[in-house]
Amino acid sequence: MTQTIETAVILAAGRGTRLQPYTFDIPKGFMPVGDERLIERSVRVLKENGIKNIIIGTGHLHEHYEKFAKENGLTTFLSPDYATTGSFHTLIYGSELIKGDFLLLESDLLYHSDAIKELLHSDAKDVILCSGFTQSNDEVYVELKDGRLENLSKKKVELNSVDAELIGIWKISTDLLEKLKKHHKEAEDGITKDYEIAIAQLADEHKVSVLKLDDLAWCEIDNQDHLERAKERILPRLD
């Protein structure tokens, strides 16, 4: 039986330097792809799947998100040191706003709604959503062991096997969040690293199941090439 999740956290503090000059004036999540901006589409898909409480962790040009949140009944928090810290710090900085199990995703994603539907239907408490190989450049590869997360890296040579690709959408339990808080306090690099590295480093002591959707239509938009791919190859496949 699947548990009910009504909260999602969207990490949106990054400066998006590889998407300049667009990100001089707007954060990455406000990039228009088709008829919607990335953040608009994510929020719509989340709400259509029963997510009532959406929290956005902001930084770069945060006022855009604050206005959008006010108009759409969302919650935001500002990570004040976003320019010198990693996404892990942003997550932990806003963690007191998170009540119960939640979905965690990044603001620069374009994805089919099946990503959210399948994740919510998973019986596992903690899940990393993965895809087959996209050949999109800048991929994060995932190593699996017995159906669970073992490790992840942008460098294939750092993994014992390359089994899937990270999407950037997760299901996280309150238990795992508490362990992440503790890790953030104790790790020397807790302030600067990305959240996915932190979760992978806890994989030995805390099981994170893998949900792999081989043919999911999705992409991350980090640079101009990603943006063109999103418009030409991903958008036509979305619902």
Image (cartoon, rainbow, N blue to C red):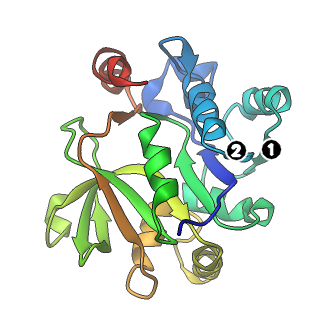
Q: Residue at x 71, y 67 (%)?
A: 100
Q: Is residue 114 above or below residue 202?
A: above
Picture disc at residue 75? 1
| Badge 2 amino acid | Ile
Query: Closer to the camera, 44 or 38?
Result: 44
N-term-proximal mark, 2 vs 1: 2
x and y, in percent, of residue 67 in the image = 81, 27
Q: Is residue 228 above or below residue 63?
A: above
Element at label 1: strand
Could one spot residue 194 in this view of the protein? no
x and y, in percent, of residue 11 in the image = 60, 47
x and y, in percent, of residue 213 in the image = 30, 49
Q: CA distance from mark 2 to mark 1?
A: 6 Å
Q: Are marks 2 and 1 in contact (CB under 8 Å)?
A: yes
Mark 2 nearby-residue class (10 Å; few <14, some 14–19, many ≥20): many
x and y, in percent, of residue 89 in the image = 63, 62
Residue 35: quadrant of the picture:
top right
Could one spot residue 147 in this view of the protein? yes
Residue 232 placement, left or right of 162: right
Label 2, on which residue? 56
Q: Residue at x 72, y 64 (%)?
A: 95
Query: Closer to the camera, 180 or 122?
Result: 122
| Badge 1 amino acid | Thr
Total labels: the figure holds 2
Q: Residue at x 41, y 31 (%)?
A: 221
Residue 181 placement, left or right of 106: right
Picture disc at residue 47? none
Image quarter in which the C terminus is found: top left
Query: Closer to the camera, 48 or 22?
Result: 48
